Image (cartoon, grey):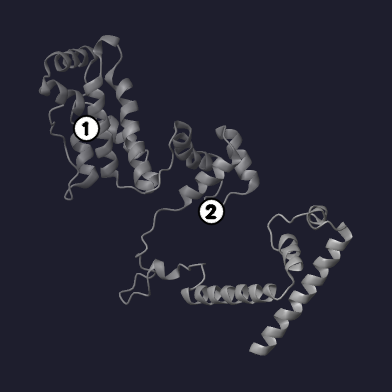
Amino acid sequence: MTAISLPIINEDGGLARYFREVWTFPILEKEEEQMLAVRFRDSGDVEAAHRLVTSHLRLVAKIAMGYRGYGLPVADLISEGSIGLMKAVKKFDPDLGFRLSTYAIWWIKASITEYVLKSWSLVKMGTVASQKKLFFSLRRLKNQLRIVDNGELSPDQAKQLSRALGTSEEDVQHMNRRLSSRDLSLNAPLSQTEDGGGEFQDTLVDERKSPEAMVLDSQELSYRSGLLQRALAELPERERFILTERRLKDEPVTLEELGTHFKISRERVRQLEVMAFEKLQRLIKAETSAAA
């Protein structure tokens, strides 16, 4: 559609002036609306499109005002709604017999709701229609049920809302958490005073170990591994093999399998395992004491 000049919300007059201006555009009678829609569809008459759009700007303003509770500038909501209205005019088919307002209301709402969803969070709020519906229905329903919007929902509140909305309690709790918080810059100041007081990122704690601790852990692991290998090397070959297969494998070999391998009884394998483990402990303690 060729660019159409529309009233704008300027800093001087604000919303009040904009509303006065859009309310000066007359509402079209059905016959005139049909005629203008046919002219635009068949010949691309920009003047006809302009009259169709301006006559429905008050509808855009009314719908936009219903989304003020999401903390976004009304001017932006109206602008997005106006884009939806122009799309509706472009796609409107007068031969179907409906009024433009009946068709345009869905385009206006779709444009505004998409803007709200994108502005609320950098992370997508919903990817399917049911999630988008939940986003816009939850706050309204909480007000109707007089549920105080003070953070986490109680299990009873979540159950009550899930039944009313026809969705799971988990989805209700998840969306309520998303509605209760907005994206926050890591550089957002903690204090509004001029001398600062730090930024939001200063309060974030890295739960991982410090580089120094990670190096110490790595050194300790290397030392213990070397100690074990040196102690194992002191054991007789058969005892070392049995101890390794029974105590140092993720899936230990059974006594029966080792007995078959060495052609001895299961009980003898168990005895050799115990003896090897005791020898290993003594060797490790001896080296540790010597190092100290």
In this rendering, does residue 146 appear at all?
A: no
Placement of 234 over or under 246, stated as above or below:
below
Image label count: 2
Q: Position of residue 264 (x, y in %)?
A: 85, 58
Of the numbered discs 1 and 2, the one sitting upstream in the chain is 1
Which mark, residue 23? 1
Which mark, residue 151? 2
Q: Which of the 4 quarters of the picture holds residue 259?
A: bottom right
Q: Is residue 25 left or right of residue 228?
A: left
Marks 1 & 2, CB-CB < 8 Å contact: no
Q: In what element is the residue under mark 2? A: loop
Q: Position of residue 201 (x, y in %)?
A: 40, 67
Neighbour tally class for label 2: few under 14, some 14-19, many 20 plus, Cα within 10 Å: few
Image quadrant occupied by the C terminus: bottom right
Q: Is residue 44 left or right of residue 217?
A: left
Q: Position of residue 193 (x, y in %)?
A: 33, 73
Image quadrant occupied by the N terminus: top left
Neighbour tally class for label 1: few under 14, some 14-19, many 20 plus, Cα within 10 Å: some
Placement of 18 over or under 268, stated as above or below:
above
Which mark, residue 50? none
Q: Is residue 251 left or right of residue 91?
A: right
Marks 1 and 2 sit apart, C-alpha to C-alpha, by: 40 Å
In this rendering, does residue 11 appear at all?
A: yes
Farthest-out residue, front: 263
Front residue (pair 54, 2): 2
Q: In what element is the residue under mark 1? A: loop
Q: Residue at x 29, y 44 (%)?
A: 74
Front residue (pair 64, 208): 208
Three-letter amino acid code at disc 1?
Trp
Three-letter amino acid code at disc 2?
Gly
Q: Is residue 124 left or right of residue 16?
A: right
